[in-house]
Amino acid sequence: MTAWTLRAFDVLDSTNEEVRREAEAGAAEGLAVLARRQTAGRGRRGRAWVSPEGNLFLSVLLRPKATPAEAARLSFLTAVALAEAVELADPALRSKITCKWPNDVLLDGAKLAGILLESRTAQVAPGSAGGGLDWVIVGIGVNLAHFPPDTPYAATALAAHGVTAAPEDFAGWLLARLGYWYGRWQGEGFAPVREAWLGRAQGIGQAVVVRLPDGDLQGRFVALDETGALLLELPDGSRQAITAGDVFPAA
Ligand code: BT5
């Protein structure tokens, strides 16, 4: 299990940005940064993350011995840890918590939390084999107290379900579960993480729309493959592995 070094701030631009600065300066694996609020919280692909005080903003620094493709699967591991942390906040929420491909945790079908993975590949001498990872930052935002009302995918917060959790407490539960799953991933690979994620997957077997940069794909979400790709069964019966995109329930 990873030993975490937690640093807490009142305000930061982004906890991912703070950890990136520390990583570039040589910080060791296990640094965890918590902020009460963020002024430039970010999501994937340049999107913004609404970051008011009362919610959780946490980023951790990892330096796994893994390829970039393997490290991309850390989002599933984080989602499972997050789901378990929510259960520690209130065990009664167990049946309402699901993991949505690739990086969200839903409560009663609405987005409770988001995960942002950022990484840097080590520089390699020209002509040598591809570089390993220098660092991976796992950034986690959880709507404990507040959620934005006007997002394309409906959002929610723990407080909206009558559950009160302080960011410091939630960070403790989350880091404990994250350390556990990171240890298992390092020892056993992706298989146990995949199984735990599938046990909580949102929309398996259902009709979905996958929004890709060049258009939408309709199909049935049939599985998560061994690499973390979403397997989509198309109307003609063929299967396509989706490695990046946003998933919505089919209308
Ligand atoms: C994510 O992006 O879901 C990843 C969010 C990661 C945020 C954490 S907070 C700590 C760390 N520091 C950072 O700067 N970031 C990480 P994505 O799947 O791209 O979702 C972003 C979209 O979700 C936005 O475009 C909005 O539509 C919506 N959104 C924004 N804020 C939200 C919120 N608080 N709750 C639910 N949805 C939100």
Image (tube, grey):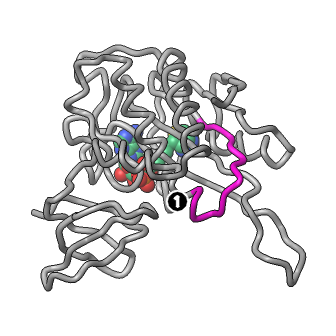
Q: What is the quadrant of residue 248 in the picture? A: bottom left
Is 59 situated left or right of 221 in this image?
right
Specify whether residue 226 is in view.
yes
Residue 51 in picture, x, y percent from top left = 48, 35
**Residue bearing mark 1:** 46
Task: Name the residue furthest front.
Answer: 188
Q: Nearer the viewer, residue 220 or 161?
A: 220
Q: Nearer the viewer, residue 167 or 177?
A: 177
Q: What is the quadrant of residue 31 in the picture? A: top right
Residue 219 in picture, x, y percent from top left = 18, 72
**Residue drawn at point x = 30 percent, y = 69 percent:** 231
Is 209 situated left or right of 115 in this image?
left
Q: What kind of residue is marked 1? A: Gly
The answer to whether 120 is drawn above or below residue 11 in the figure is below
Q: Nearer the viewer, residue 48 or 180?
A: 180
Q: Is mark 1 within 8 Å of ligand 1?
A: no
**Residue drawn at point x = 45 percent, y = 51 percent:** 191
Report the magenta residues as a range.
59-71
Residue 61 lies within the magenta run: yes
Residue 86 in picture, x, y percent from top left = 36, 26
**Residue drawn at point x = 20 percent, y = 53 percent:** 203
Q: Nearer the viewer, residue 190 or 154?
A: 190
Residue 150 in picture, x, y percent from top left = 27, 45
Task: Name the residue furthest right.
Answer: 125
Specify whether residue 41 is in view.
no
Mark 1 falls on what kind of element?
helix
The answer to whether 70 is drawn above or below residue 201 in the figure is below
Is 91 situated left or right of 245 in this image?
left
